[in-house]
Every structure is written in C-alpha cells, then in structure tokens.
C-alpha cells in the first residue's frame, strides 16, 4: 500500500466481523484489537486495546439487526477513537439502518435517517463510507463527507453469468427504484418494467400492477434491500401470472426479517442474489434460493484510496 500504511487501522463491531476480516485480508492489514461486549443489563461496552493516536481509523459496522445494539456499538466505538486522539475516523457502514424514514410522510413522525446521521457525526466520525443508501438525499443529512458506493458491478458480474444471454427484463418494485433499475437494465442491455404497488400499512402491500412487458422473459426484481420479502414475493407471483419465464430477485442488503425466508422458499423466485453487507442469520444461511456475493474487495479498495488521499469516483460506476 502507499503512504503511511502503519497509520491505517481497521476495527469492527459485532454486526459483521466476517466482512471486516475479509476487508483486512484484501488490504493485508491486521484487524484492530478492540473489545466490544455487553454488560449484564444490556448496555454496550467498548475498549480499544491498541494505540490509535494520530492513526487513520476505519470502523466497520452495519447497523443491521439488532439495529439499536449495533448502532450503539458504532457510536461508542467512534467516541472511543475520538477520545484516543485518532487523526481521522471513518465510519464504514455497509448497511445504513434507520434509512427508510428519510422524510415526513405523515404528521408527528421522526426523520430517523437524519437523527442517526447527527448521532454518528456527534460521536466523532470524520467521514462516512457506505453502500447503496436507501435514498440518495441521506448523504445531505451529514455535514461531513459521505461516499456512497454501489454494489451494481458485483451484482452485474454474477447476473451476466447466470442469465446466459436470455431475454431479460429488469423490474423495479416501486417508483422510487426506477433510476436504479434503469441503470441496471442499460448495462445489461435489457428492457425495463415497473411495479405499481399500493400499501395498506407498514410492510403490508395491498395491490400490485405491472407496467411493462414481461411475458416469456427472464424477470429480475431489483431493489436496494429486502426486509420481510413481502413486496418481493408478491411481485414474483404477479410476474408469474403475467407469463414471466424465470424470476430472480436481486438486492444489496438482505435484511430478511420475520417470515422472509419462508416466503422466499414458497415463492416462484428461482434465486435471490444479495451481498454480504448484512450477515445472513438463522435459517437464511441454509436457504438454497439465496446466493450471497462479497463486496469486501470494493469496500477495501475505497478504504485504500481514502487512506492514500486518492479519488474513489471510479468505484461509483
């Protein structure tokens, strides 16, 4: 690596240690020594076990389930490094939780994504490195630099091998994901369709209509995250009804909470392609329909370039 490699320090919380170790392997640096534990009453405890004074510190922590615990661990680690006089502290958040409430859609609700941004900044982060934010405007919630990487190159490489030149239509599961789906479709030289969904409540979809032609096509449902998998599996049923030949799901963040795995297993989905920004828990790890791709090399390269004060704009392509 380039200048001052000894100053590069990478630490991890408990949310995704496997990804952090893989990032360290790519960078050929050891994972930093830190104890992240829980007191008997549930409070998080953090203790850094090595000198970080003047160091360029990167803290790898997805704020996935259990979201509150992992967020608190991240905040305490940032505060610990700030008080230990680290020169720069970058919060590497492969999956940025609390991102779905990014604006006021009804009276008397919080803007959770902004609150979390304020907490992370106050705790001591100098900059943010994240992946596929739920919405682009969240970058503006921070008053520090934010690098929002995209998993598209990793997903595209696998999808191209998987499809074997079949006729493909990329499906956006809602209007908000059209830009992402259009970019994906352009790179695959595929057509585009949109699902118009009407919600009757949080995580509850009441009705779905497909806008576009999917008959006889290999349909790829593309989203940034899959949580309860309700939208994904209902969309798969709708696509099957409209004559889609094969149906695949594709996402960056496989949150997969509640009955998600059961829904995926019972659905017409052939496969759900995801990345390791969120570790698969419970029976998700043994589900044959889920294919996990690693984004460690992408994050590692972003960390390398950030440490060496080089541009990372080419990684956004």
Image: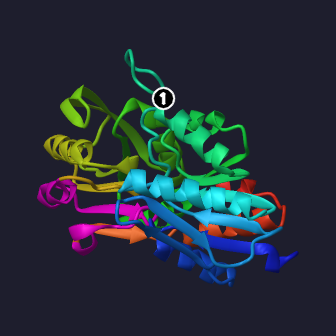
Whether residue 301 is visible to the viewer of this picture, yes or no, is yes
> In the shown orientation, is residue 229 left or right of residue 296?
left
Taking depth in this image into account, of 118 and 200 the one nearest to the observer is 118
- Which quarter shows the N terminus? bottom right
Taking the magenta stretch, the answer to whether it contains residue 283 is yes
Whether residue 161 is visible to the viewer of this picture, yes or no, is no
> In the shown orientation, is residue 251 left or right of residue 256?
right
Identify the secondary structure beneath mark 1.
Answer: loop
Where in the figure is residue 152, as x and y percent of width and height? 53, 56
Tell which residue pokes out farthest to the top in this image.
Answer: 107
Residue matched to label 1: 111
- At horizontal 33% and vertical 39% (from top left) the residue drawn is 173
Quadrant in the rendering for residue 193? top left
- At horizontal 15% and vertical 61% (from top left) the residue drawn is 265
Vertical relation: 131 (above or below) 24: above
Where in the figure is residue 50, as x and y percent of width and height? 69, 79
Residues shaded magenta: 259-286
> In the shown orientation, is residue 28 left or right of residue 254?
right
Quadrant in the rendering for residue 212? top left
The residue carrying pointer 1 sits among few (fewer than 14), some (14 to 19) or many (20 or more) residues within 10 Å by Cα, namely some
Vertical relation: 20 (above or below) 75: below
Taking depth in this image into account, of 49 and 58 the one nearest to the observer is 49
Where in the figure is residue 157, as x and y percent of width and height? 50, 66
- At horizontal 58% and vertical 33% (from top left) the residue drawn is 137
Vertical relation: 52 (above or below) 253: below
- At horizontal 60% and vertical 47% (from top left) the residue drawn is 120
């Amino acid at each position: 690596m380039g200048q001052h490699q000894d100053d590069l320090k990478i630490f991890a919380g408990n949310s995704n240690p496997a990804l952090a170790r893989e990032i360290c392997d790519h960078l050929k640096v050891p994972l930093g020594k830190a104890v992240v534990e829980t007191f008997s009453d549930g409070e998080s405890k953090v203790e850094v076990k090595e000198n970080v004074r003047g160091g360029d510190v990167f803290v790898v922590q997805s704020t996935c389930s259990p979201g509150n615990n992992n967020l608190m661990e991240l905040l305490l680690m940032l505060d610990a490094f700030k008080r230990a006089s680290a020169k720069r502290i970058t919060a590497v958040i492969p999956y940025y939780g609390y991102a779905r409430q990014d604006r006021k859609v009804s009276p008397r609700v919080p803007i959770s994504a902004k609150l979390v941004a304020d907490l992370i900044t106050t705790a001591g982060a100098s900059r943010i490195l994240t992946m596929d934010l739920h919405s682009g405007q969240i970058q503006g919630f921070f008053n520090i630099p934010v690098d929002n990487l995209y998993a598209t190159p990793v997903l595209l490489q696998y999808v191209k091998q998987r499809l074997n030149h079949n006729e493909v239509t990329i499906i956006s599961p809602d209007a908000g994901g059209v830009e992402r789906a259009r970019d994906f479709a352009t790179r695959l030289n595929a057509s585009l369709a949109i699902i118009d969904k009407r919600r009757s409540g949080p995580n509850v979809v009441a009705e779905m209509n497909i806008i576009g032609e999917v008959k006889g096509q290999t349909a790829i449902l593309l989203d940034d995250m899959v949580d309860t998998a309700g939208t994904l599996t209902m969309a798969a049923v709708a696509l099957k009804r409209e004559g889609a030949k094969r149906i695949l799901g594709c996402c960056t963040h496989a949150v997969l909470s509640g009955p998600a795995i059961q829904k995926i297993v019972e659905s017409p989905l052939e496969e759900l392609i995801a990345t390791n920004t969120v570790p698969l828990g419970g029976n998700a790890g043994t589900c044959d329909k889920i294919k996990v791709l690693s984004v460690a090399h992408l994050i590692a390269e972003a960390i390398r370039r950030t440490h060496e004060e080089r541009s990372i704009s080419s990684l956004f392509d």
